[in-house]
Image: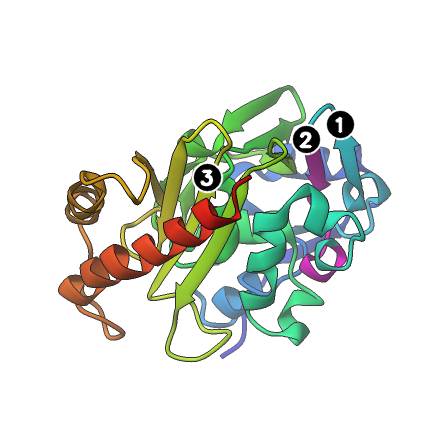
């Protein structure tokens, strides 16, 4: 199939992009890497009147370190972050996730913020944003606003981005020294979307956060006791049931809950073992 007809705006500046979005409103879509949007256009699941290409806006293609955070612009490709030299030291959890995202070919085109905008509940980058409790910076012609990860994802492939608005950047906090992180994923094949993906953060103060993707309509996170605590398994089981797992062609709800219990424990144990 071919896309429905649309107008194409190749923005050279952020103002040009914002003006085009303001003019078209909810009839416009931003395109960056296009790895999610183009297939939807071809299948006519998305039928925008205007596509606004932001990949030539220089200011959106930068990665910045700022006061304990890493700001990743909307034009930064996944391979650009993957090859960023400070990544493993600054964002070890993201560094462990990136090789699991699609394949080298898709990461060479897809953007970090594009994956967040697509909001597939099985994708790794929305899970990373929630696990790290990052923020999304949104911009329109008239205003700027910042949303925490918990408020950004509204449902399956649905976000809080309003008509005329675009993601300008995502901001991820760096973690204190001595923090342990771990990531594990179960998929049919490497590069497929996850049946269940788990990301764990174990801080030096003893607190543990587990985030899970691929189960509910959005990634979900919970604070858990130490895996050596006798209450750990009950807390993890309660979380697995609270996710309202879904059945689909890839796995049953029961299988997904079982994976949350087993892979979730393994991930937390690995993160806790890396803590110092």
Residue positioned 52% across, 65% down in the render: 41
Question: Does residue 186 appear to the left or right of 254 in the view shown?
Answer: right
Q: Is residue 72 magenta?
A: yes
Label 3 – label 1 distance at C-alpha: 23 Å
Disc 1 is placed on an element classified as strand
For mark 1, does the 10 Å Cα neighbourhood hold few (<14), some (14 to 19), or many (20 or more) residues? few
For mark 3, does the 10 Å Cα neighbourhood hold few (<14), some (14 to 19), or many (20 or more) residues? many
Looking at the image, residue 117 lies above or below residue 46: above
Residue positioned 55% across, 70% down in the render: 102
Of pointers 3 and 2, the one earlier in the residue sequence: 2
In which image quadrant can residue 176 be found?
Answer: top right
**Viewer-nearest of labels 3 and 2?**
3
Residue positioned 70% across, 35% down in the render: 71
- Viewer-side residue, 229 vs 71: 229
* Residue numbers of the magenta segment: 69-80
Residue positioned 26% across, 60% down in the render: 262
Residue 194: percent from left, percent from top: 39, 65
Q: Quadrant of the C terminus?
A: top right
Of pointers 3 and 1, the one earlier in the residue sequence: 1
Label 3 – label 2 distance at C-alpha: 18 Å
**Mark identifier at residue 66:** 1
Residue 10: percent from left, percent from top: 78, 52
Residue at the disc numbered 3: 202
For mark 2, does the 10 Å Cα neighbourhood hold few (<14), some (14 to 19), or many (20 or more) residues? some
Residue at the disc numbered 2: 69
Disc 2 is placed on an element classified as strand
Looking at the image, residue 113 lies above or below residue 215: above
Does the image show residue 117? no
Question: Does residue 240 appear to the left or right of 188 in the view shown?
Answer: left
Question: Does residue 273 appear to the left or right of 107 in the view shown?
Answer: left
Does the image show residue 191? yes
């Amino acid at each position: 199939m071919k896309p429905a007809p649309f107008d194409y705006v190749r923005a050279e500046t952020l103002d040009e992009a914002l003006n085009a979005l303001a003019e078209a409103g909810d009839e416009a879509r931003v395109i960056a890497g296009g790895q999610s949007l183009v297939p939807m256009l071809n299948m006519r699941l998305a039928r925008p009147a205007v596509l606004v290409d932001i990949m030539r806006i220089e200011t959106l293609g930068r990665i910045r370190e700022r006061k304990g955070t890493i700001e990743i612009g909307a034009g930064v490709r996944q391979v650009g972050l993957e090859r960023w030299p400070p990544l493993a030291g600054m964002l070890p959890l993201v560094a462990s996730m990136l090789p699991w995202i699609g394949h080298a070919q898709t990461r060479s085109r897809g953007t970090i913020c594009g994956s967040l905008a697509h909001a597939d509940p099985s994708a790794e980058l929305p899970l990373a944003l929630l696990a790290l409790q990052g923020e999304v910076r949104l911009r329109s012609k008239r205003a700027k606003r910042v949303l925490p990860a918990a408020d950004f994802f509204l449902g399956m492939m649905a976000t809080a981005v309003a008509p005329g608005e675009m993601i300008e950047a995502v901001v991820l906090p760096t973690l204190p020294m001595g923090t342990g992180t771990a990531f594990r994923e179960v998929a049919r094949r490497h590069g497929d979307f996850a049946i269940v993906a788990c990301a764990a953060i174990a801080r030096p103060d003893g607190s543990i956060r587990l985030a899970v993707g691929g189960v509910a309509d959005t990634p979900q996170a919970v604070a858990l006791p130490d895996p050596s605590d006798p209450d750990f398994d009950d807390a993890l089981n309660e979380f697995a049931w609270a996710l309202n797992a879904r059945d689909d062609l890839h796995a049953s709800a029961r299988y997904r809950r079982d994976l949350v219990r087993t892979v979730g424990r393994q991930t937390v144990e690995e993160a806790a073992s890396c803590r110092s």
